[in-house]
């Protein structure tokens, strides 16, 4: 099988094939996921946008951390890491821009937060509402062990204070980029993950990026269909042992 090679070749831009396509603004997919208003919303603390450790120090310190202390992490650290990951950093009349860049400003990556042990937040699966900087509780309970099993038995997901699971809503990006969208969702997720890792260090936490998982098992835990929206990347975050 060589479909990866085929994809790379077939999704190249060339001067002969690019252009000529106009965007159908009436069919632009919505930027934000909505949930029923009866689900419980947890507002996150206002993030500190001006302090933190110097950038070069964070770059020097960041390492993948896989062993965590089971102590609770504060809600303010959770807020800080989530905002840094892809929170809103600029609102204008027409657009909201985020801490992470996104191809075409289409922001196809959604964040789910699987909380195991954070002060003030019951364990459960949450969706990060970027524009409100809040979490919506989708499912209460401790899903750390299930997530660890779904990640090929990587125990750090069980021991982490919280885990971020990133999905792609592919139609948001396909609307403009068609099949080339698959290149961009992974690039977008990479930016978000690096922001997360650096913010974790600044909060005296550790993180580890996770690309090895049984896709459908993770999708079942967070409740997405695996087609219109599918998991692409995860990160565990906790206090280093
Ligand atoms: C796309 C990607 C997927 C990764 N998946 C895993 C993973 O599933 N499990 C794991 O323990 N580490 C994973 N890592 C972390 C790498 O092993 C780690 O970044 C690498 O060994 C370099 O070490 P450092 O992060 O401490 O600099 C992943 C990293 C990336 C960028």
Image (cartoon, helix red, strand yellow):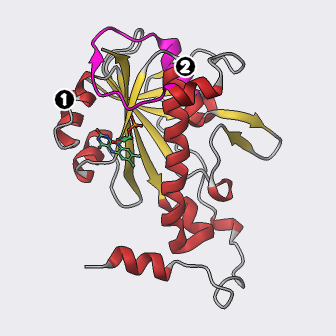
Front disc: 2 or 1:
2
Between 173 and 197, the one nearer to me in the picture: 197
Query: Where is 58 relative to 24, above or below?
Result: above
Q: Position of residue 106 (x, y in %)?
A: 63, 55
**Which residue is painted at 34% across and 19% down in the image?**
161
Relative to residue 59, is residue 112 drawn left or right?
left
Residue at image location 70% in from the left, 72% down from the top? 23
Q: Quadrant of the C terminus?
A: top left
Q: Which residue is mark 1?
A: 145
Above-or-below relation of 214 to 4: above
Q: Which quarter of the figure has residue 152?
A: top left
Q: Is residue 39 left or right of residue 87?
A: left
Label 1: how many Cα within 10 Å (few below 14, some 14–19, many 20+): some
Q: Residues within 10 Å of mark 2 (few under 14, many from 20)?
A: many
Foreground residue among 31 and 68: 68
- Looking at the rendering, the quadrant in which ligand 1 lies is top left
70 in the magenta segment:
yes
Magenta residue span: 61-83
- State the residue position of label 2: 202
Residue 16: x and y, percent? 66, 91
């Amino acid at each position: 099988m060589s479909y990866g090679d085929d994809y790379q070749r077939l999704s190249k831009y060339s001067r002969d094939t690019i252009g000529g396509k106009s965007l159908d603004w009436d069919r632009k997919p919505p930027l934000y996921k909505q949930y029923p208003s009866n689900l419980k919303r947890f507002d996150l603390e206002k993030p500190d946008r001006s302090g933190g450790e110097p950038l070069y120090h964070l770059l020097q310190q960041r390492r993948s951390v896989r062993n965590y202390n089971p102590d609770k992490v504060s809600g303010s650290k959770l807020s800080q890491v989530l905002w840094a990951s892809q929170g809103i950093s600029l609102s204008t009349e027409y657009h909201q821009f985020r801490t992470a860049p996104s191809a075409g400003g289409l922001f196809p990556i959604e964040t789910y937060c699987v909380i195991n042990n954070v002060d003030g937040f019951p364990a459960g699966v949450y969706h990060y509402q970027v524009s409100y900087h809040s979490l919506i509780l989708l499912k209460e309970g401790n899903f750390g062990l299930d997530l660890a099993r779904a990640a090929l038995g990587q125990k750090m997901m069980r021991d982490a204070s919280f885990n971020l699971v990133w999905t792609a809503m592919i139609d948001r990006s396909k609307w403009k980029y068609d099949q080339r969208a698959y290149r961009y969702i992974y690039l977008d997720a990479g930016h978000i993950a690096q922001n997360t890792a650096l913010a974790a260090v600044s909060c005296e936490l550790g993180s580890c990026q996770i690309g090895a998982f049984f896709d459908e098992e993770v999708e079942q835990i967070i409740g997405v269909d695996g087609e219109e929206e599918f998991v692409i990347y995860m990160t565990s975050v906790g206090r280093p042992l």
